[in-house]
Image (spheres, rainbow, N blue to C red):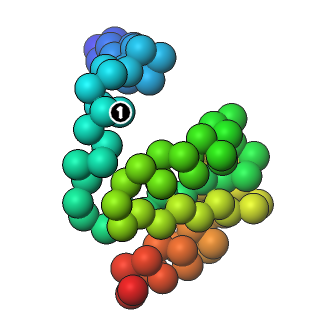
Amino acid sequence: MIVYIYNMYLSSILQQLNEPNPEWYARITDIFMPTLIIGGRFSHILQNKLQEVAELIPNCEFVTIEDAGQFVHDTNLSDFLAVLKNFLDS
């Protein structure tokens, strides 16, 4: 049962990632809260694409963690926490 539920959610998430609703991207400039985007240098998501998204969001900070991949908090927790603490303290 748990595997079925996991696969169901994973399928939904992957569909949204592979075929995002165009309205989502069109409304990204509506985000008004301070926003932090953290990327890992070795992630399959290109850092320049994350930078492009960050530039569309008002009051957004983008940080690349050099020694991390897709799961930044897992591969480089100390740098992840340092970036997060700096963002929250500013």
> Secondary structure beneath disc 1?
helix
Residue 66's place in the image compared with 78, above or below, is: above
Q: In the image, is 32 to the left or to the right of 36?
A: left
* Location of residue 34 in the rendering, given as x and y in whole percent from the top left corner: 31, 68
Determine the residue positioned at 26% across, 38% down. Answer: 27
The image shows residue 74, relative to residue 83, as above or below, that is above
**Could you tell me which quadrant the C terminus lies in?**
bottom left
| 88 w.r.t. 61: above or below | below
- Say few, some or many: other residues with alpha carbon within 10 Å of mark 1 (under 14 / 14 to 19 / 20 or more): few
Q: Which residue is found at the position 47% from the left and 66% from the top? A: 61
- Number of numbered discs on residues: 1
The image position of residue 50, as x and y in percent, is: 56, 46
Q: Which three-letter amino acid code belongs to the residue tagged 1?
A: Tyr
User: In the depicted view, which residue is nearer to us: 27 or 70?
Assistant: 27
Residue 43 in sight from this viewpoint: yes
Residue 66 percent across, percent down from the top left:
75, 62
**Left or right: 22 with respect to 71?**
left
Residue appearing at x 66%, y 47% in the figure: 47
7 left or right, relative to 39: left
Question: Is residue 6 in view?
Answer: no
Q: Quadrant of residue 89?
A: bottom left
Residue drawn at the location 67% of the way across and 40% of the way down: 46
Looking at the picture, tell me which residue is in the foreground, 8 or 44.
Answer: 44
Q: 9 left or right of 83?
A: left
Residue 45: image x %, image y %? 63, 37
User: Image quarter for residue 59?
Assistant: bottom left
Mark 1 lies on residue: 25
